[in-house]
Image (cartoon, rainbow, N blue to C red):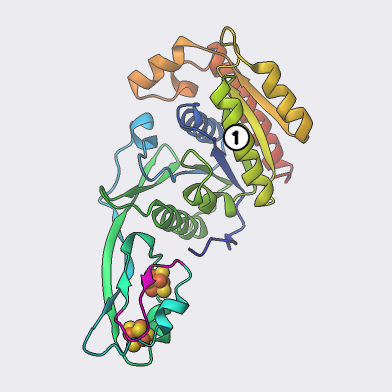
């Protein structure tokens, strides 16, 4: 599918990402957004983890009724189709297959909704079909704007939904006088993650000092390099007993990647999850709260200095 390449809006965007789930990526994104907001910046937090968005729950925010996201799907009329295969050749996603002289078969889960097949069909055999793939929501509280994308259950095309979420966020950013947007991406290194990374100015890769954390960090760093996106590392659970912190430091050192923050294990984080209140509000003076504040002030200063 076509990937977003430009954001067309002059607001710095910081993506918080991670090679695997459960590293604390959303916790960092939420607290970074809340902390920057508490520092007086106008902040938009974008939840682009469309398979399971949970920023609203962590913030205790109530979402609006939402906007349905629909995508084009070709509807082929067999009586008009002459089996010329032009639509098959035009489909870069290989969502249409056929033999010469036969009506193509459509694989919806591969379709990006680009409409190229309809454009090239010279026989008027492709009509408009539409499918709802999810919903985008917004919420506001205490000067913090939240934009959320949620994939419809059973819908497999999360990259399309991530793209729609980013586009909704950019459209909201154009109207708002924002100082920064923070995007919580999906975990992993697939196209759902690449969509928000393409429009970002900096990626914070959140990881933990475990074998899986070190393994997956290499992949997310490789993805950022492929996208030519500046990336830095945030080490969560930094002091976990028996952890592989030295190995992570080596990975960063070898690649010339900055370790921007180390967040220690802290029971207050668990309490903040249970309370549905970000740590920066619930316990800013806890060990993890202080580490997050240091990250927040670093990003704030770099935003103010025009470095992001
Ligand atoms: S381009 Fe139109 S006529 Fe040709 S195979 Fe596709 S649907 Fe049929
Ligand atoms: S809209 Fe048509 S050309 Fe585009 S991906 Fe779907 S089937 Fe392929």
The region drawn magenta spans 93-103
Task: Give ligand 2's quarter of the image.
Answer: bottom left
Residue farthest top in this picture? 241
* In-image side of 133 versus 245 (left or right): left
Quick one: label 1, few (<14), some, or many (20+) residues within 10 Å? many
Residue at image coords 29%, 81%: 103
Dividing the picture into quadrants, the one containing residue 218 is top right
Q: Magenta includes 95?
A: yes
| Percent x, y of residue 290 | 59, 17
Closest to the observer, 275 or 145 = 275
* In-image side of 24 versus 199 (left or right): left
Q: Is residue 237 visible?
A: yes
Dividing the picture into quadrants, the one containing residue 94 is bottom left
Residue at image coords 45%, 10%: 267
Closest to the observer, 175 or 30 = 30
Q: What secondary structure do most residues of the magenta stretch adopt?
A: loop
Height in image: 260 above or below 153?
above
Q: Is residue 199 visible?
A: no
Residue at image coords 72%, 23%: 249
Q: Which residue is mark 1?
A: 205
Residue at image coords 50%, 31%: 25
Height in image: 201 above or below 210?
below
Q: Element at badge 1?
A: strand
| Percent x, y of residue 89 | 46, 78
| Beta carbon at label 1 within 8 Å of ligand 2 | no
Residue farthest bottom in this picture? 123
| Percent x, y of residue 109 | 34, 59
Height in image: 185 above or below 292?
below
| Percent x, y of residue 195 | 51, 53
């Amino acid at each position: 599918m076509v990937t977003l390449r430009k954001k067309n809006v002059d607001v710095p965007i910081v993506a918080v990402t991670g090679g695997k789930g459960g590293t604390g990526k959303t916790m960092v994104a939420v607290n970074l957004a809340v902390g920057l907001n508490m520092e007086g910046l106008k902040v938009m937090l974008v939840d682009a983890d469309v398979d399971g968005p949970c920023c609203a729950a962590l913030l205790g925010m109530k979402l609006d009724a939402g906007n349905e996201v629909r995508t084009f799907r070709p509807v082929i009329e067999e009586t008009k189709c002459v089996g010329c295969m032009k639509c098959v050749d035009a489909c870069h996603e290989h969502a249409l297959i056929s033999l010469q002289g036969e009506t193509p078969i459509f694989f919806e889960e591969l379709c990006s909704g680009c409409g190229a097949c309809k454009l090239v069909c010279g026989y008027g055999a492709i009509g408009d079909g539409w499918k709802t793939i999810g919903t985008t929501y917004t919420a506001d509280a205490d000067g913090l704007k939240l934009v959320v994308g949620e994939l419809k259950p059973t819908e497999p095309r999360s990259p399309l939904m991530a793209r729609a979420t980013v586009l909704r966020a950019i459209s909201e950013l154009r109207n708002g006088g924002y100082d920064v947007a923070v995007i919580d991406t999906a975990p992993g290194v697939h196209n759902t993650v690449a969509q928000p990374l393409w429009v970002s100015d900096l990626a914070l890769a959140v990881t933990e000092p475990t074998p899986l954390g070190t393994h997956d960090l290499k992949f997310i760093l490789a993805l950022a390099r492929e996208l030519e996106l500046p990336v830095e590392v945030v080490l969560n659970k930094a002091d976990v007993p028996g952890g592989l912190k030295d190995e992570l430091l080596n990975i960063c050192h070898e690649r010339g990647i900055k370790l921007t923050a180390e967040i220690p294990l802290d029971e207050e984080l668990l309490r903040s999850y249970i309370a549905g209140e970000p740590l920066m509000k619930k316990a800013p003076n806890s060990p993890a709260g202080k580490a997050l504040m240091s990250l927040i002030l670093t990003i704030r200063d770099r935003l103010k200095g025009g470095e992001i």
